[in-house]
Image (cartoon, rainbow, N blue to C red):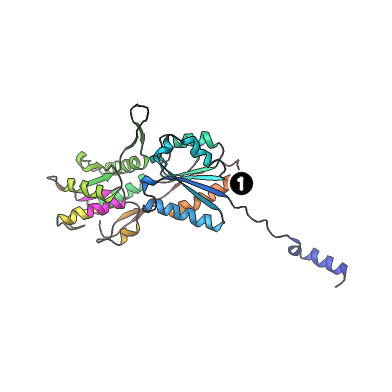
Amino acid sequence: MNTSQSKETLKKNPLQRKSSPPEKRAYTFGVITSVAKDIFRSHYHREIVAGLFDQIGRGNHELKFHIFQKDSYQNLDDLFKKYSGLDGLFLIAWRWLHPDLVRLIQKSLGDTPTIVFNDFEPELKIGVLYTDVCQGMKDMVCHLSGKGYARLAAICGPSHISFRKTNGKAAEKVPFVDAQEKVRGFKEALKECGSSIKKSWLLRCSAYNSNEGYCLTKKLLGEKQKPDVIICANDDLAFGALQAIAEKELSVPEDIAVTGFDDTEKASLVTPKLTTVAQPLYKMGQDAVHFLIEKIEDSSLRPVQKCYPTKLVIRESA
């Protein structure tokens, strides 16, 4: 082929003239969370982190963890200095870390793209990915009412989180949005179904763990009139409830039904298998990386605020 023929061939086949696509940049992300939340054993947090790792690995990005210790309350400036060089930041369980953490991050880290998970607030000026736990609780109550359950009790989370002050001032309280939204869904659904709320059947735990579920269920079973179903704000509370019911030699769901929230791995392994509400936590972790990269590469984009639907998972316990 002569020179003129080669040039003509290239004109007719422009793909041969295209250069390879530019290599995508690898970013460095940070995660701030709390050792107090036992993140690597909690299904809720572990699923989010797994989703983060999945997308981080696909892009050969780097992820750095910072476990928020108690002394970080007095050394927030030092904390933020560690993250000043990051491309983006994720906050997990931020309401349990510091009452003003998000505001301080916005002030100290400036335009660093940031995403928090759940505990949605409309006034937040950073990215938020959250699930509609209120609707998830409504779906559960409507399912139970449709099956004929009329005496519904609920074991929910604390309405507020308290932070001790080091300067002698009174403890500061901030709303625990997840717990408040689940209680709102419970109450609204009962009202829509025409059922009344018995005050002593709406209990609040101090932590989302099985021991709390066990102790509070024993309290419910000690009442003269017992509920015919116990709705738990997460699966761990429900596992404790199942233990307390078994010790009373009662059957689930024949004598009393139990439901959870989160759809952990154990939910389908216990006996009876647990009816619960699933949250797309793994996908939220994946999406968070995608949204943060979009924001990094186009600073004009507004911080994403996305609500994810929950899914009712019906099994044997209710």
Along the viewing direction, whichever of 142 and 307 lies nearer the viewer? 307
In the rendered image, residue 51, in percent from the top left (x then y), is placed at 46, 55
Q: Is residue 263 above or below residue 186?
A: below
Q: In the displayed structure, does residue 108 sit left or right of residue 170?
A: right
Q: Quadrant of the C terminus?
A: bottom left
In the rendered image, residue 113, in percent from the top left (x then y), is placed at 54, 42
In the rendered image, residue 6, in percent from the top left (x then y), is placed at 83, 68
Q: Is residue 5 magenta?
A: no
Question: Would you say residue 29 is visible in this rendering?
Answer: yes
For the record, the magenta segment spans 224-242
Residue on which the image places disc 1:
297
Please give the name of the residue rendered at 37% of the width and 46% of the height, measured from the top-left corner: 37
Q: Quadrant of the N terminus?
A: bottom right
In the rendered image, residue 109, in percent from the top left (x then y), is placed at 54, 37
Neighbours of disc 1 within 10 Å: few (<14), some (14-19), many (20+):
few
Q: Is residue 227 magenta?
A: yes
Residue type at the position of mark 1: Glu
Please give the name of the residue rendered at 59% of the width and 53% of the height, measured from the top-left corner: 26
Please give the name of the residue rendered at 25% of the width and 45% of the height, measured from the top-left corner: 154
Q: In the displayed structure, does residue 20 sit left or right of residue 278?
A: right
Q: In the displayed structure, does residue 271 sit left or right of residue 26?
A: left
Along the viewing direction, whichever of 98 and 2 lies nearer the viewer? 98
Q: Quadrant of residue 73?
A: top left
Q: Tally the marks.
A: 1
Question: Would you say residue 146 is visible in this rendering?
Answer: no
Q: Quadrant of residue 169?
A: top left
